[in-house]
Amino acid sequence: MWLTADLPGTGGVFKSQEEDFVVEELPAYLPCGTGEHLFLLVEKQGLTTLDLVRRLARQCNIAERDIGYAGMKDARGMTRQWLSLPASAAQGRLSETNDRFRILKTALHRNKLRIGHLRGNRFRILLREVEEQALPHAQAILCELAVRGVPNRFGAQRFGALSNTHLIGRALLAGEFEKAAQAMFTTGENIRNPRWKAGAELFAAGNFEKALEVLPETCRTERSVVKALAQGKTPRAALLALPQRLLRLYISAWQSAIFDRVVEARLDTLGQILAGDLAMKHANGACFAVSDPLQEQARADAWEISPTGPLPGAKKMLWATEAAGAIEQKALAGDKDLLESSALPAGLRPLGERRALRVPLGEASAELVSDGLQLTFTLPAGSYATCVVEEVMKSAVAS
């Protein structure tokens, strides 16, 4: 389960308070000072990026799609990130200090901010109630991760509070819409809100009207599906009426689950180039088929390249062959037919891409502070701090 399994962990408590998790976006570029788009550096707490976008859109009376951002940040923590919106719409409407967020800096730029327009993120994380030898343990683990790399898993945070988003995505791709709806209302022990749990049980019993009465208002997606079913709509119609952005997230979660299986299968030799591998150049993200594993291993050891795994999609996506390919096909297992599925509209079918199995850990340090152990490090865009935290603590954590 752990890349650094031979090193003892620190134990501890992760994210017991919002201020224990601080993340600062490292932009790919800074605004130039002129242009039609206003860039905002925003510090937020207790809001997801999409929550922040909704609030800014309401303030400026614009559509949410008019607001750009480089990466998604979750709600549990303090984050600083850049967003953009049309400068003309923002004039005189933005308030610098708001409930749960404040605007630290503004500047004009020529283009809208897009997903991926960032180098990475810098994290400052406080672990409370750590073990006595936490500092030397953490330092040893961070040192090994700096050499071998961080497993580039998506992890539990990618699969939602009920660990079910990948199940919904798989059912959607298979055209099993009733099963997808059922997966949204998993009545497992992860549901702690009593009204949510009661609503899920009523849904499972087929009592949609009563479930709608009981489900909390915060369960917006679930309520939308239940309402449609109560009105006599088919599961397919109820689900495809959801925002396409959300449906794509479900499908992306299924892709992420397949990728994580490949990471787990190759964990002991995460930086080793295998026969048939598709490797990625860290400098520009370009992938290429490995013809000579021994020759390319030297480049992997120098952190020029890393092996990749699949985020499965359309036929044209490249798959590894030989030894590396056998691992990928085993991870895909019974889901291979989904790549041919036409159950969803063309715009929702995944195209597929490759993702590095490991990422470099930068500027890593650990120190004891009054409240516990503080970790500081940087990771490239698209990778998750929990992958480092779990290695350090030697326990799975919730996002």
Image: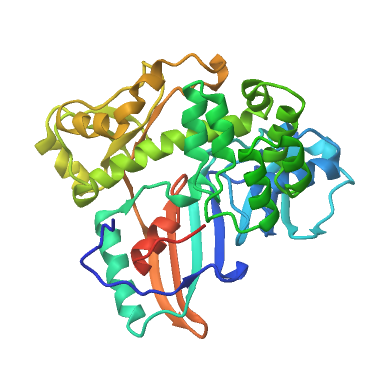
Please give left or right for residue 348 compared with residue 90 in the image.
Answer: left
Q: Considering depth in this image, is 394 or 83 the residue closer to the camera?
A: 394
> Is 274 situated above or below 195?
above
Query: Which percent across, then down, holds residue 396?
Result: 40, 61
Q: Residue at x 45, y 22 (%)?
A: 351
Query: Which percent across, then down, holds residue 67?
Result: 71, 37
Q: Residue at x 17, y 28 (%)?
A: 276
Query: Which percent across, then down, holds residue 78?
Result: 62, 62
Q: Is residue 196 visible?
A: yes
Query: Which percent across, then down, holds residue 180?
Result: 54, 31
Query: In which quadrant of the rendered view does residue 315 lie?
Result: top left
Q: Is residue 37 visible?
A: no
Q: Residue at x 35, y 79 (%)?
A: 135
Q: Considering depth in this image, is 236 or 385 the residue closer to the camera?
A: 236
> Is 65 situated above or below 48?
above
In the rendered picture of this protein, how many numbered marks are placed on residues? 0
Question: Residue at the right extreme?
Answer: 92
Please give left or right for residue 232 compared with residue 320 in the image.
Answer: right
